[in-house]
Image (cartoon, helix red, strand yellow):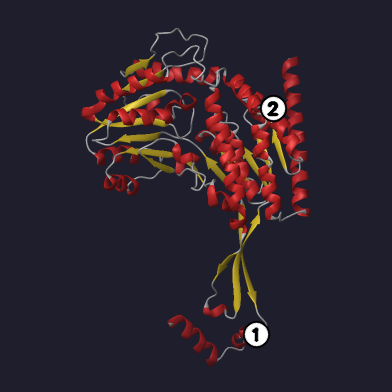
């Protein structure tokens, strides 16, 4: 009982601090509504030393949160990608800020029109646990490039990383510019009810629905970066060894705990065994041992571990063929590590066939023709990512034109997320809206249309009382 009271008091403290910071940021927006390009670039560039000067601390915090998080995966997927984003946004924001010239129609002549890109105000960012640093910094960069003030809610599942980010952001920015909020689920729920000028959420589809409902109370626009089951289609003639190697990059990173990780393989039916052999050989090469291997990341917590184990138990009971790849036959009890596992002979009654996996398990589904594979994809909710392996460009174009996905990567996996100059975002159940690139700047800006009239007032010729001159003018424009 005492522990529950203490936890409640801690949650209330987070919520009270959160509301105070929100009011301070709102006030600061009114006092400085349009930061210059120099100010925005300076804010963005402050983040680089914050990341690089504390590299060891980030690695340690993430390792502690996960139980074991590969240090090199943290450097690659959290730090390198964030630093690249810093350089990209600082370089391009001046161009994005320039007013966009537009043309007036005959009825508005003489006059000038253009579009101004104005900061929205205070932006809220809700961060998931799988890449807590990168998925905080990425949207923060877009929001700062657009001139906003930002509040970041970190996941309760990564408390050490959240605490470190709160401390270092506090040393880098005033609270009325950027602030980090930590706390449990109740704090996250309260965060989503604030009247932000925009709210970006990265996480599961089910939680995304709750976020959207909460934001609707304030008519807060939302960007939802969700997940889903991202398919990977192997073309009929694509070299299987190459496919396994390239798919492994996207699936093995963070032990599959990635929103764009391949969820299931659509494999030519006559090549399924070939894929199983190639995949097994690839995983054996990457991870000859698992338990004490620092390169092999653990599942984030016991809840997620049991969820994944439950998928395997359910699939096995319903007739699936399970291929577990544990090269040294180690006992992984207590490690929260799960071997990379293929699940074959899948049917739609299995939970693993409908739920996003988010771990080192992968389905293998045979197909006869490419159109059969596309039908399988299109019969299911639209995914965040789609992968297709084929050197035939015509087949690649056919896939692009006949499927919907948040993004597509041809002949590789997850690389598209690291390209700063293209938008990142889902579609339908995998999300809505974009960030990264110019689209990220636009997401966090108000595109304000402006019309400016000159000294000559042509409108006086169409004022009441209306007569033949007005009628002739209207018909002239209509029939032109």
Q: What is the distance, in whole Å, between disc 1 and disc 2 at their CAs? A: 61 Å
In this image, 126 relative to 234: left or right? right
Residue depicted at x 42% and y 39%: 385
Give the structural element (helix, strand or loop) at label 1: loop
Which is nearer the N-term, disc 1 or disc 2? 2
Which of the 4 quarters of the picture holds residue 275?
Answer: top left
Q: Position of residue 269 (x, y in %)?
A: 23, 29
User: Taking 35 as reference, is 202 above or below it?
Assistant: above
Look at the picture and state if 438 lies above or below 206. Answer: below
Task: State the residue at coordinates (69%, 53%).
Answer: 38
**In x, y percent, where is residue 411?**
35, 38
Q: Which mark is residue 163?
A: 2
Whether residue 150 is visible: yes
Disc on res. 437: none
- The quadrant of the picture occupied by the C terminus is bottom left
Snapshot quadrant of residue 68: top right
Q: How many marks?
A: 2
Residue at 28% in and 41% down? 391
SS under mark 2? helix
The image quarter containing residue 283 is top left
Disc 1 and disc 2 in contact, CB within 8 angstroms: no
Q: Is residue 473 left or right of residue 183?
A: left
Image position of 341 with respect to 130: above or below: above
Q: Nearer the viewer, residue 358 or 178?
A: 178
Foreground of the two, 215 or 127: 127
Q: Which residue is mark 1?
A: 456
Mark 2 packing: few (<14 Cα in 10 Å), some, or many (20+)? some
Q: Horizontal placement of 203 versus 320: left or right?
A: right
Quadrant where the image shows the N terminus = top right
């Amino acid at each position: 009982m005492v522990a529950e009271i203490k936890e409640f008091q801690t949650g209330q403290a987070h919520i009270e601090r959160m509301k105070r910071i929100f009011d301070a940021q709102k006030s600061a927006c009114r006092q400085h509504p349009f930061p210059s390009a120099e100010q925005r670039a300076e804010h963005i560039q402050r983040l680089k030393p914050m990341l690089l000067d504390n590299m060891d601390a980030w690695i340690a915090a993430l390792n502690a949160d996960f139980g074991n998080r590969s240090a090199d995966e943290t450097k690659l997927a959290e730090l390198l990608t964030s630093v690249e984003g810093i350089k990209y946004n600082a370089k391009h924001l001046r161009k994005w800020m320039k007013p966009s010239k537009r043309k007036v129609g005959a009825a508005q002549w003489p006059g000038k029109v253009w579009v101004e890109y104005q900061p929205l105000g205070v932006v809220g960012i809700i961060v998931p646990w799988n890449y807590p640093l990168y998925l905080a910094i990425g949207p923060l960069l877009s929001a700062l490039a657009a001139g906003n003030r930002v509040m970041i809610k970190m996941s309760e599942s990564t408390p050490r990383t959240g605490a470190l980010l709160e401390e270092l952001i506090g040393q880098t920015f005033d609270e009325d510019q950027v602030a980090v909020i930590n706390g449990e689920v109740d704090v996250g729920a309260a965060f989503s009810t604030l009247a932000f000028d925009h709210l970006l959420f990265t996480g599961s589809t089910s939680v995304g629905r709750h976020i959207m409902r909460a934001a609707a109370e304030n008519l807060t626009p939302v960007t939802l970066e969700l997940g889903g089951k991202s398919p990977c289609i192997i073309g009929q003639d694509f070299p299987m060894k190459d496919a396994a190697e390239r798919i492994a990059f996207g699936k093995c990173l963070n032990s599959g705990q990635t929103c764009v990780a391949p969820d299931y393989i659509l494999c030519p039916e006559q090549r399924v065994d070939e894929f199983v052999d190639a995949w097994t050989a690839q995983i054996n090469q990457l991870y000859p041992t698992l338990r004490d291997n620092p390169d092999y990341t653990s599942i984030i917590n016991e809840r997620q571990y049991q969820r994944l184990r439950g998928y395997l138990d359910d699939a096995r009971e319903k007739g699936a063929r399970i291929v577990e790849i544990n090269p040294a036959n180690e006992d992984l009890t207590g490690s929260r590590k799960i071997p990379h596992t293929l699940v074959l002979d899948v049917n739609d009654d299995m939970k693993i066939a409908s739920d996003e996996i988010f771990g080192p398990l992968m389905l293998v589904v045979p197909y006869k023709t490419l159109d059969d594979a596309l039908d399988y994809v299109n019969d299911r909710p639209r995914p965040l990512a789609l992968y297709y392996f084929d050197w035939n460009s015509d087949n690649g174009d056919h896939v692009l034109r006949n499927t919907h996905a948040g993004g597509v990567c041809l002949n590789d996996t997850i690389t598209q997320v690291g390209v700063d100059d293209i938008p990142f975002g889902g579609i339908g159940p995998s999300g809505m809206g974009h960030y990264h690139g110019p689209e990220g700047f636009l997401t966090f800006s108000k595109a304000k249309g402006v019309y400016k009239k000159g000294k000559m007032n042509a409108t006086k010729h169409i004022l009441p009382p209306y007569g033949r001159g007005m009628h002739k003018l209207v018909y002239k424009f209509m029939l032109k």
